[in-house]
Image (spheres, rainbow, N blue to C red):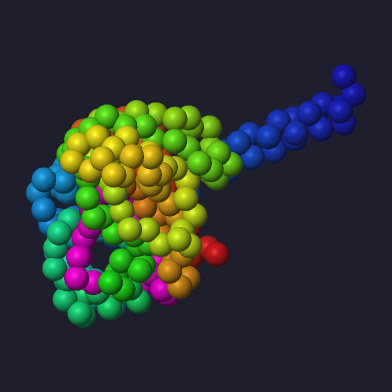
Amino acid sequence: MNPMRKLFIVLAAIVCTTCQTVAQESALKGKKVLFVYGGWDGHEPKQCHDLLKPWLQEQGAIVYSYDKLDVYTDKEMMGKVDLIIQTWTMGSISGEQERGLLEAVRNGAGIAGWHGGLGDSFRNNTEYQFMVGGQWVAHPGGKVDYDVNIKDKKDPVTKGLKTFHMKSEQYYMHVDPSVKVLATTTFNGGGDAPWIMGVVMPVVWKKYYGKGRVFYSSLCHDANDFGVPEAFEIMKRGIEWAAQSKEN
């Protein structure tokens, strides 16, 4: 074989391998992630934290875990984090804590969360709800069987996924019409709210608040629900998307 041709083939192989390595590198590598968990124990905040933290670290993220909301008043911490993951249901947040959180996201930190841990955290705080893009109001019938339908099949968060099934709380929410809806669910009118039969409700969405990326999924009532592969995959991809907020 011609020596120059052989060299070209070797170099091409090296370039190809390098490209594959870069493509496989996680969006979370080197990212500073603040993981805040607490609130109502029924949503298993600590168990969810303990499930997700090892995955975050495997992806190369630097994780700071807190079970107190006071961390939102730490300006140094809030200024350096790339992503905030919050699972805190039915809590109370002080004015100073809320301002610290909202300011961090407005300035470019991403935020991601699921179910009541982000979508039913602070019922008296409308600016917080404005940031999230929605607020839980009901789950008719409690834990029920329902389908999740992929609405946006091109977005990286949902690409390649198909309709899947959940047996959990089907969240009925008040939703900001400006969010980008990635997946929905349709209520069958069962349980104690037959008048909502046929209502199509957003389940997964993304949006911005100031410069910050916001990702939300209403799935996963507790840690066991992450055992549904599609639900877990959506959450992981959403976290990766939100973690790149400061790269905009």
User: Which of 162/58 is in front?
Assistant: 162
The quarter of the rendered structure image containing the N terminus is top right
Magenta stretch contains residue 150? no
Furthest residue toward right = 2
Left or right of 135, for residue 30 = right
The part of the image, by quadrant, that contains residue 77 is bottom left
Question: Nearest the camera: 234 or 79?
Answer: 234
At which x and y percent is residue 6? Answer: 82, 26
Residue at (53, 43) in percent of width and height: 152
- Answer left or right for 88 relative to 213: left
Query: Is residue 150 shown to the viewer in this render?
Result: yes
**Vertical arrangement, residue 152 with respect to residue 64, above or below:** above
Where does the magenta region start and end? 104-125
The quadrant of the picture occupied by the C terminus is: bottom right
Residue 175, percent from left and from top: 37, 58
User: x, y percentage for residue 8?
Assistant: 81, 32
Picture mark count: 0
Q: Quadrant of residue 15?
A: top right
Query: Can residue 24 be seen in the rendering of this structure?
Result: no
- Residue 139 located left or right of residue 219: left
Residue 112 among those drawn in magenta = yes
